[in-house]
Image (spheres, coloured by chain):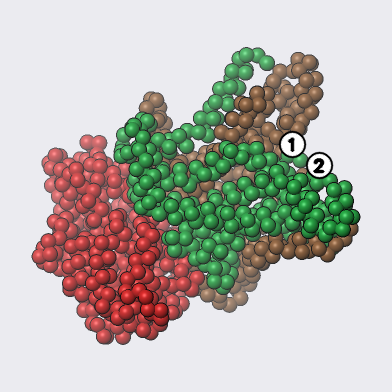
Amino acid sequence: MSNLSRHIQTVVLFVFAIYALAPVYLVLLASMRSEADLFSGPLSVPWPINIENYRRVWQESGFSVFFLNSLKISASVTVLVVLSAPLAGFAFVKMQFKGREALFALFLAGLVVPAPSIIVALYGNLQALGMIDSHLGVILPQAALLMPFSVFLMRTVMQDVPDELIEASVMDGATFFQTFLRVVVPVVRPGLMSLILIVFLFSWQEYLLPLVVLQTESLKPLTVGAASLQGRYGVDYGGIAAAGLIAFAPLVALFLVMQRSFVRGISAGAVK
Amino acid sequence: MPTRSAYLFLLPALLLYLTFVAIPILQIVYFSFFDWDNGIRGGFVGMDNFARLGGDRVFLAALGHNAIWVILTLAFPLMAGLLLAAILAERSNNTRRWLGAIYFMPRTIPLVVAGIIWGWIYNPLFGLLNYILDGVGLGFMAGAWLAEPSSALLSLNVVGAWTFFGFCVVIFLAAIQSIDPSLYEAAEIDGARWWRRFRDITVPLLKNSTLFLGLYAAIEAMRFFDLIWVTTQGGPGYSTEVLTTHIYKTFFLVGDFGYAAVLSVVLLIIVLSLSSITFWLLKSK
Amino acid sequence: MQRLISISVGAILAAGSAAAETAITQWDQFSQSGITAAGPAMDELIATCKPALDGVSVLRTVAPSIGIRDSYRLAVSAGKTPDLAYTWPAASVLAGYARVGALAKLDKYYDQYGWPQVNEFYKGRNSYDGHIYAVPMEQDLMGVYFNRDLFAEKGISVPTTYAEFQAAAEAFKADGIVPVSFGNRDRWPATNTFSLILGLTVGLQAEQDVFFGDTAWTNAGFKQAAENFQAWASDGYFPRGFNGIGYDEANALFLSGRAAMTITGTWVLQDMIRGADKFDMGVFMMPPMADGVAAGTMWGEGSQWQLSSTTSAEGQDAAAAYLNCLLSDESRKVWVQKGHTVTIGTTPEELAEWGADPVVQEFFEGGLATTETNFYDLHTTLPESVTQVLYPELQRLVGGEASADEFLETMQAAWEVAIANGERWIP
């Protein structure tokens, strides 16, 4: 390849890196500015670095509570999904039963159902179940909405488990469940890791469900808290920036550390 | 071997899915045939609620915006992702790893937060974008971005693309890496330049990934809500109204449950058709 | 734009320990800063009014002033109506809740406690089908906050006619100063601005002919009002991109000294007084905008206290006694002094006597001088289905996307549908 076109390509790579990073960098700057003067110098590097915005948002605006709520909701959704989706995925790939195709199609249909389209009915049902304004009312529907994707991902992952392993285990007199735990789970551990990360990420990002289900302030997660900040501080962009960072920094950190698992999960099924 | 324990394996996932997704879908369809007042169900009205769709300007505008969103997404982040993946595929492992991570990172940011960040960048009074444009002598290009009907949807799409192009890079990159390297080597021996290799080998062999991402983008374009709700709430006027915001307003702000159910049914029909097409196309390959 | 939310869910008072004691859940908007930032006053009054509760405890939640309207709707439709709520708006929206039986009738408490400051006008706004469902508290008024220093610098005096107002705006514009700070990204602020322009263009009677009579929106007076609003935008009275500027941001622009005026209500008095540390701030009443229209301003109760129909009888009794205490003469003084909040029935003389901030006095002296001709807030007059059409249509009108005629035709269509659905509120 000629040097010129390689340089042009490098410029393209660089420009898109700026596109991806610049907004995050600007938010970081704003969050550390001691007195966010709206009308001047938003690009200057704040010095000395100031964590007052973080302290204020964390302690006074309840972000420590929102953070714990996000953690609780996302962790619960993840646990629920991890306890159920791999079993279903396994059944769909490695077990024969009546209605397999139909049931799988049923799950597939759910892959694209948007939360806003069922919220009208969901809201009434949660009310009837007494789950409005409770974390359970967010956790269960969210796990359910993520279930089709998770089952689909697990089915793809389980395809790589050699049938001989399973047959050998069953021949030894193990039940399917024992086989699943002792033979299958160790083999698909990387796939499970991907599932955990993706489900955690998606449930952390969820906004609509907690927005409509939770009414008590002390139950709300970070996404809802951050959105309500917009007017709450009026024009205190330092506080809003700090709140935004608190809301996404854990996800970015998690992603950077576990990048491989993320990518594997996301591209499974898409490439083949 | 057929086995009954399969049903036990399926039970937890199925129970959750039926209770909180499948049954609500059926209920939505049922609700759409009734009259509602402030959340209380009234009499059966047949197709009356559906008949309102044709005369609902906001619905038609929203549908149009959803369609524009799909086209913009196909034109920009998807194409950019393809190009970047093709370039990255020839770089060192380290470059690939780091740039891949950087491109993908916005995707990990909740759309609500992305909306807040970009809403601030676009702010007409003290937005960073106008500030930067002024600073580099392009002040004449400064605009009111989200405040103008002509630029609002496009400006929001830049935010959507920001969270999506890295996802495309990752998917395309994985697909390119599964292409047989000998194809490229043969082409290189034949003297094919980069652009020709990209056009003649990479693009045709990525047909499935492109199809997948294209339909994924289309379905996402029908489903998104957060980004619009925290930035423009569908405004100014109706210029960024989409189906999901129309549903939200009809349900939660006006309290018209019956019509909100109709809009939900329409949304479901669209996404389910799109996904059926995807699977049929991918299967027929 | 949401407002404060402190998580003081647990501001539990009362004797605490008794196992079987009744608790009342209270939702209010009295945050520590921002719109209706009367948090300190509320805290003090809860302590003061504790005896009135007779052992019943109050579980308080501070909800965002803007958000409370939607959260309350959700709570009602979820069957979780809070026992006592200080929410908005009355009239049309309240009627919807009363219609579905979510609210307790308060007639007997009005008989018991009198509450004479709630006159027939306010009673009407809080009634549905012959019964009264709420107790209004705050006196809200619309006015023009202005930067006295800028006015003095340019040698402009406070406008007393619409022509003078226009001349002032032109003068500021020529000097590169934003004449009127205005931000409508949050969609609701334009409704207040338009309510004011409408009343000052057509007068109270013409409004009533439409809202409670048979006159259509598509009439010459309404058209003139819509054109006036649109002209302010096209003549450059507002900052660029106003449809993308938040309400708080518009206030901040004014407080930064870069805009000469901003037109909004008494509900941000506290924040404005606190924020105007760089210049001398004043308030005047917008003059009539057409010949033969009487001076006046948009007024209303802002928010009102309402009780859930699901609350126990003794809970309702305790809540009513507590409300009576919140509205007492001593309490009114606390609201004014600690909360910059003026309750209905408070006179300008009392404000002077109690040492209210001069800006507060100026605002209420002006607004309460015209009680006979003050007019309606569209928020509290239109059913929610019409308001949700008004929001985007006003963005289009002011943004120049729709003509005055198109705007009024759309509003008339939504109005007819609402009337056909039995949603119209008539006092």
Across and down, in percent, residue B76 comes to 59, 35
Give me the residue at 47% from left, 33% from top.
A22
The amino acid at mark 2 is Lys
Horizontal side of A131 relative to A168 (left or right) equals left
- The reply to whether residue A16 is in sight is yes
Q: Nearer the viewer, residue C40 or B222?
A: C40
**Residue that label 1 marks:** B207
Give me the residue at 34% from left, 66% from top.
C11
Q: Nearer the viewer, residue C66 or B30?
A: C66
**Residue that label 2 marks:** B285
Horizontal side of A74 relative to A263 (left or right) equals left
Across and down, in percent, residue C330 comes to 17, 72
The chain that hosts pointer 1 is B
Chain that is coloured red in the picture: C
**Helix, strand or loop for disc 1:** helix
- Quarter of the figure with the C terminus of chain C: bottom left
Give me the residue at 79% from left, 28% from top.
B180
Horizontal side of C76 relative to A117 (left or right) equals left
Mark pair 2, 1: CA separation: 10 Å
Give me the residue at 58% from left, 48% from top.
A201
Residue C205 versus residue B229 in the image, above or below:
below
Q: Residues within 10 Å of mark 1 (few under 14, many from 20)?
A: few
- The reply to whether residue B55 is in sight is no
Palette colour of chain A: green
Of the numbered discs in the image, which one, if any, rests on residue B197? none
Across and down, in percent, residue C112 comes to 26, 85
**Helix, strand or loop for disc 2:** loop
Are the residues flagged by discs 2 and 1 in contact, CB closer than 8 Å? yes
Chain that is coloured brown in the picture: B
